[in-house]
Image (cartoon, grey):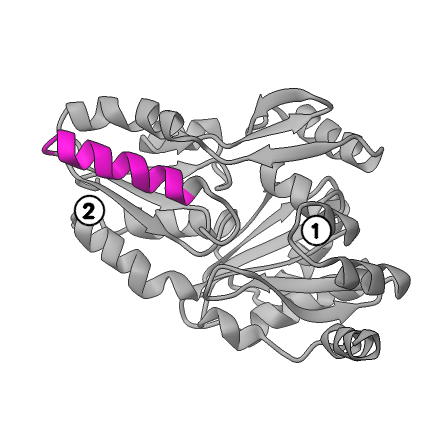
Amino acid sequence: MNQFVISVDSSACFTAEELQRHHILMVCLSYTLDGVVYEDRFENDAEKQRFYDLLNEGHFAQSSKANPESFRKAWEPEVMEGRSILHLSLSSMVSGSYESACIVAKELNEKYEAKVRVADTKTGSYAVTKMVYDIMDMPEMSVDEAADFVERNKNAYNLIFTVGDIKFLYRGGRISHIKAIVGGLLHLKPVLFVNDEGKLTFMQNARGARQAVSMMAEKMKKNASEKTQSAYIAHGGNESLALLLKSKLLEIFPKLSEVRLDFLTPVLGLHAGPGSLVLCFRGAGRNGVLEESPLKEMIEKVKHIRD
């Protein structure tokens, strides 16, 4: 057992049973759906599917970062008991939750003898889940050694994804208006990834969901390493698409010890939208999957014409 407590925010994919069994702290982001504020968590599978059905029907949702008080409430009881904490944060490039965590960590480190370390994973979703389990497999590490492990190795935790409708990325401020227009007009299904800076990056374009699934599987093959022993899939309400990706991964990697599958958490899901699909795995450095995108070239041409 580790000498410290691991903390994550709710963009990471853990069940309530896992959190309790491993004594993992979870600090929730929040989202607003049709004017009502909810914590960034699902209670059951029916609630998960209903969330994506509502998004698909056009109901409006927007997200909020985890505020400092949420971190303080989760962490202070632990440090008061003398336990140190390592927090693995959703990428600072896509959420302000990292900043909130750093504010509270500084405050608690000055107030108590126990130590709080905050690591910017530069990723999210199941990539953080895998990172946590890898740390738990090295129980001899101190909190500082575990934080150093994250800093040295986080680039190896890959997150590749596609979306059902590019408008959700635009609505959430994750892509520009021109990219949304061009992608929508051409009915392109972009395959994207989180780069080593923690930013969403276009990688390749597909004509339809099935081609996107094949591309994602091939990208994992390209960026696999001896550390690629498992895969994690999160979906936005389209389980059949997730199962198709799982099938393709098992064709390519028949010796995978685990291919885990679940719904994408609400805050990430409202930005990616219904029909989204996320693939996470530990492999080679993230930028190894990058290729030139036809959409990128097209956007540059359009911008040149406008200028």
Q: Is residue 114 left or right of residue 63?
A: left
Residue 47 position by quadrant: top right
Q: Quadrant of the N terminus?
A: top left
Element marked by disc 2:
helix
**Badge 2: few (under 14), some or many (20 or more) residues near its Cα, within 10 Å?**
many
**Rendered location of residue 224, percent (x, y):** 50, 71
Element marked by disc 1:
helix
Q: Residue at x 47, y 36 (%)?
A: 14
Q: CA distance from mark 1 to mark 2?
A: 36 Å
Q: Is residue 153 visible?
A: yes
**Badge 1: few (under 14), some or many (20 or more) residues near its Cα, within 10 Å?**
many
Q: Is residue 102 left or right of residue 185?
A: left
Q: Is residue 215 magenta?
A: no
Which portion, as a residue range, is magenta?
98-113
Marks 1 and 2: CB-CB under 8 Å?
A: no
**Rendered location of residue 151, percent (x, y):** 31, 60
Disc number for residue 285: none
Q: Is residue 69 above or below residue 87?
A: above
Total labels: the figure holds: 2
According to the picture, the residue beneath numbered tag 1 turns out to be: 169
Disc number for residue 143: 2
Say which of 255 and 13 sits in front. 13
Q: Quadrant of the C terminus?
A: bottom right
Q: Is residue 201 above or below residue 304?
A: above
